[in-house]
Image: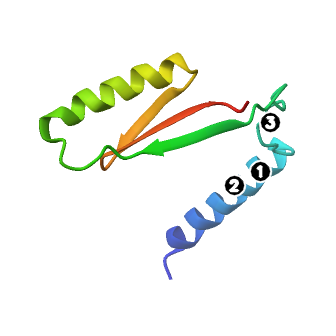
Amino acid sequence: MNLKKLIVPTLCVLLGCAGGAAMGSVTAQTFPEPATIRPMQQECIEPPSGLGRNRLDFVRDEVRIRGEHGWELVGEVLGTVCFKRPAQ
């Protein structure tokens, strides 16, 4: 058996164990609790079908109107437009 094939893995194991013992304990990074967690309201709407090119105008008007009432646009997925605001 080739001695080199035995010495290299053995040396790697010993160095790994020595390095692990020298590190001490490893702790995960922690973050403080948020001061307050505000509950949010969520609402999604789907524009009426058959609007065609007017769909963008409908969404634009809906975003403006809801924005005046404290809603924030979250995004759009497959034609559904979603909003959120702090719970009242």
**Amino acid type for the residue under numbered disc 2:** Gly
Residue 76 vs residue 11: left or right? left
Q: Find out whether the residues at labels 1 and 2 contact each other: C-beta distance under 8 Å.
A: yes
Residue 66 image position (x, y, % from top left): 48, 25
**Amino acid type for the residue under numbered disc 3:** Thr
Position of the C terminus, as image quadrant, is top right
**Amino acid type for the residue under numbered disc 1:** Gly
* Image-quadrant location for residue 38: top right
Residue 39 vs residue 74: left or right? right
Q: Residue at x 58, y 21 (%)?
A: 70
Disc 3 versus disc 1: distance between alpha carbons? 22 Å
Mark 2 vs mark 3, foreground winner is 3
Which circle's residue, 3 or 1, is located before the other in the chain? 1
Residue 83 image position (x, y, % from top left): 50, 35
Residue picked out by circle 3: 30
Which circle's residue, 2 or 3, is located before the other in the chain? 2
Disc 2 versus disc 3: distance between alpha carbons? 27 Å
Q: Is residue 36 above or below residue 39?
A: above
Residue density around tag 2, few if under 14, some if 14–19, many if 20 or more, within 10 Å: few
